[in-house]
Amino acid sequence: MNHQVTFDKLTSPGSAWTLQRCVPATDGDTALRRMIWVYFWLLILEGALRKWTIPSLSAPLLVVRDPLVLLIYLQAVRCRRFPVNGYMFAYFFLFVCFMLLAVVQIVAGVGGGPLVAAYGLRTNFLHLPLIFLIPQVFSYADVLRVGKWILLLSIPMAGLMIFQFFSTPSSWINAASTSDGEQIAFVVGKIRPAGTFSFATGAAHFFVLATAFLVYGLAEKTRVYSRWLLGAALVAVAIVQPVSGSRTLVLDCALVLVAAIAFVFLSPKSASGILRMIAFICAGVAVLSLTDLFREAVTAFMTRWDSANAATGGVQQGIVWRYFGSFLEPFVLLPQIGLIGQGLGLGSNAASMLMTGSLQFLLAEGEWARIVQESGPILGFSFLAYRVWVAVSIALRAAVAARQHQLLAWLLAWDACRSLATEQLSQPTNLGFVVLVCGLCLAAMPGERLGSPASFGAKETAGPPIDRRFQSQVSGEWCT
């Protein structure tokens, strides 16, 4: 054991930090924390590796985080940090049931065979325990560090996406992760910029997370991040909205702002900070609107918005029904699914590449329909119910945190809960961001950890540890 000092609880109620009883952190905790940071960096950079650096290894790099996840779990078991709670018991029960289903499907000749079924099990189950493991080792200060890096990266990421926006679809900077693939079209002569990610969905997840940390930094009374960082990140996040060409990105970022406004009703004394944040954002957008770049991007985005709505029957059909209708789609498909489903993993892009040699949807595009089609109605709806259960639990805990004036957990929860309940986990980047934002949300919450005490009799504490490099905002001295 090293001599590193950590705190049971670190929260930021209002303008002051609260520090409570110190406990020692082990070398195992430090190694575990570092591996989670490697997971974060691989999530950000794996698309760049697949598109530009070593495209010949694009397929193996699709699952480059999987071995790391297994190492994280082994390390967590070794240092008694692997979570054991009701959520994990339900997880393992479902995992065993799905493994038995895979065997039944393979024997019955249903689906794409053992390799596709294994990929389906990996998609649904391999990364989910990280949601509960991250708050075991990440402190509030660690969450703030992740936020700082997200904001720092948002600046060059926005510049890269602007470059992609003005480049031709065939340009090397707009390469896809497969040699015969291409980025999604935006308007005539434009594509939806993907940044360093394989596709535009990764950039959307990244900037929604950046928006949450930006809003938090602007609204907090204490200076969580430097003014120059917040100012530069504000410009980056604002300009990416029209440049992205993604209605999902814009609407989800807007949802974070709605969450900030709703926070006032749960924590009225935070109203001044929220108003200050809104003023900064409005000022930033007003300045950007004077530039030709921003105006051109807005014009292109509105063209995309109008054409998409017209093609799908207006806003009601194009956005509202597209979202809420996805929940009803599996019920419509039930007569053609069968009791044991149509094959685990069959709805993933990896399965389509293995079976057809091209990227296409072999099953439904929506996540709920994919899950039920792959695994049948009994286990399919059970897995969806599990995800909704965890999402609702996070939402309720976030509401309690908001009553305790915890803005960051509240903002992250809006993205975490929506993503966990509805996001397409078959896309590796989506899966990585779902796990990351849910874990960060739980780590940002005050009080006891989610669920019962940690595994193998490890003593439960009030919050995950931090290291001594964090500078106390109370005394201004280094914690030693």
Image: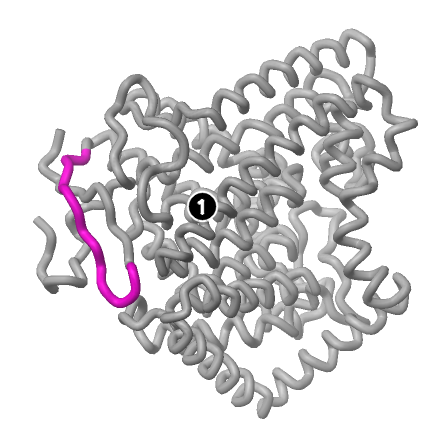
Judge whether residue 172 is colored magenta: no
Q: Amino acid at mark 1?
A: Arg
Viewed as shown, does residue 239 lie left or right of 319?
left
Dot 1, how many residues are within 10 Å of its Cα: few (below 14), some (14-19), or many (20+)? many
Viewed as shown, does residue 138 lie left or right of 213?
left
Extreme residue in the bottom direction: 290
Looking at the rendered image, the quarter that the N terminus falls into is: top left
Rendering coords of residue 26 (x, y %) = 19, 31
Q: Which residue is mark 1?
A: 397
Asked if residue 149 can be seen in this view, the reply is no
Rendering coords of residue 171 (x, y %) = 68, 64
**Looking at the magenta stretch, what is its main secondary structure?**
loop
Asked if residue 306 can be seen in this view, the reply is yes
Rendering coords of residue 3 (x, y %) = 9, 37
Is residue 215 shown above or below 440? below
- Residue 161 vs residue 129, the one in the foreground: 129
Viewed as shown, does residue 29 lie left or right of 370?
left
Rendering coords of residue 111 (x, y %) = 80, 21
Q: Secondary structure at mark 1?
A: helix
Q: Residue at x 27, y 30 (%)?
A: 460
Q: Quadrant of residue 70?
A: top left
Q: Which residues are magenta?
A: 13-25
Viewed as shown, does residue 332 lie left or right of 281?
right
- Residue 416 vs residue 287, the one in the foreground: 416
Q: Residue at x 60, y 20 (%)?
A: 94
Q: Residue at x 17, y 47 (%)?
A: 20
